[in-house]
């Protein structure tokens, strides 16, 4: 007995998948752009506590009324070039607002001048009267909070990493599928 003849053709060709839509490249690119925007925005938000101010008060012995938004703690930033003292009063009650010395070393530079965090106080009713002596100016602003700083720092790292990583994966997978797929117009 003779073996059956081999067919004159090889195995049937495997049908290639269709290429993904070009919109997937747009999705991957948009995720990368969103990662950059989120990183910059979160970085600015994280450092905002060190840069914001509610008011600048002249240290000339006159009382200045300062409106405070929110109920977060505030800090008195004194000019390093002068020996300044400040008193904070709640105008609704007439009572002195208790201030606490700053634990740690907080400094900021603005307009060529250097300030050091001197004391913190609660916002109270939302309006305070600040009287400072010693010449120069004093900045009243939000007190930096370590917990929100750490949270902001972690968000600044991981949110862009997640978005950028997702965008990179989408672009790589789309590129591989696009290169190995048959054109979309081919049937």
Image: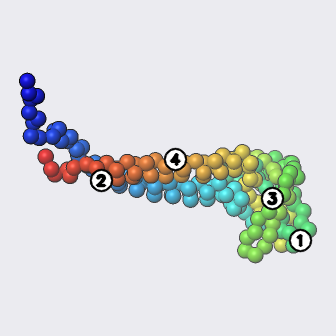
Q: Nearer the viewer, mark 4 or mark 2?
A: 2
In the rendered view, does 160 fall on the left or right side of 123? left
Crowding around mark 3 (Cα neighbors within 10 Å: few <14, some 14 to 19, many 20+) is: some
Instruction: Name the residue located 72 percent from the left edge and 63 percent from the top edge.
Output: 55
Q: Which residue is mark 1?
A: 82
Label 3 sits on a secondary structure element that is loop
Instruction: Name the residue located 76 percent from the left edge and 65 percent from the top edge.
Output: 108
Crowding around mark 4 (Cα neighbors within 10 Å: few <14, some 14 to 19, many 20+) is: some
Q: Which residue is mark 4?
A: 162
Furthest toward the top, the residue is: 1
The disc at residue 106 is: 3
Q: CA distance from mark 4 to mark 2?
A: 26 Å
Label 1 sits on a secondary structure element that is loop
Q: CA distance from mark 3 to mark 1?
A: 17 Å
Q: Earlier in the sequence, mark 3 or mark 1?
A: 1
Q: Nearer the viewer, mark 4 or mark 1?
A: 4
In the rendered view, does 35 fall on the left or right side of 177? right
Q: Nearer the viewer, mark 2 or mark 3?
A: 2
In the rendered view, does 30 fall on the left or right side of 91? left
Crowding around mark 2 (Cα neighbors within 10 Å: few <14, some 14 to 19, many 20+) is: few
Q: Nearer the viewer, mark 1 or mark 2?
A: 2
């Amino acid at each position: 007995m003779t073996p059956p003849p081999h067919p004159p053709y090889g195995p049937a060709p495997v049908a290639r998948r269709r290429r993904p839509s070009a919109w997937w490249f747009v999705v991957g690119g948009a995720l990368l752009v969103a990662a950059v925007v989120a990183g910059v925005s979160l970085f600015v938000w994280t450092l905002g506590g060190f840069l914001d101010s509610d008011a600048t008060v002249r240290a000339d012995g006159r009382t200045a009324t300062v409106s405070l938004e929110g109920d977060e703690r505030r800090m008195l930033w004194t000019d390093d070039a002068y020996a300044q003292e400040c008193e904070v009063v709640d105008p609704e009650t007439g009572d002195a607002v208790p201030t606490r010395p700053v634990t740690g070393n907080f400094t900021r530079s603005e307009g060529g001048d250097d300030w050091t965090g001197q004391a913190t106080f609660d916002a109270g009713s939302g309006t305070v009267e600040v009287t400072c002596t010693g010449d120069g100016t004093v900045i009243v602003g939000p007190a930096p909070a370590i917990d929100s700083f750490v949270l902001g720092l972690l968000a600044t790292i991981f949110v862009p990493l997640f978005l950028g990583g997702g965008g990179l994966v989408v672009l790589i997978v789309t590129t591989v599928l696009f290169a190995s797929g048959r054109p979309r117009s081919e049937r």
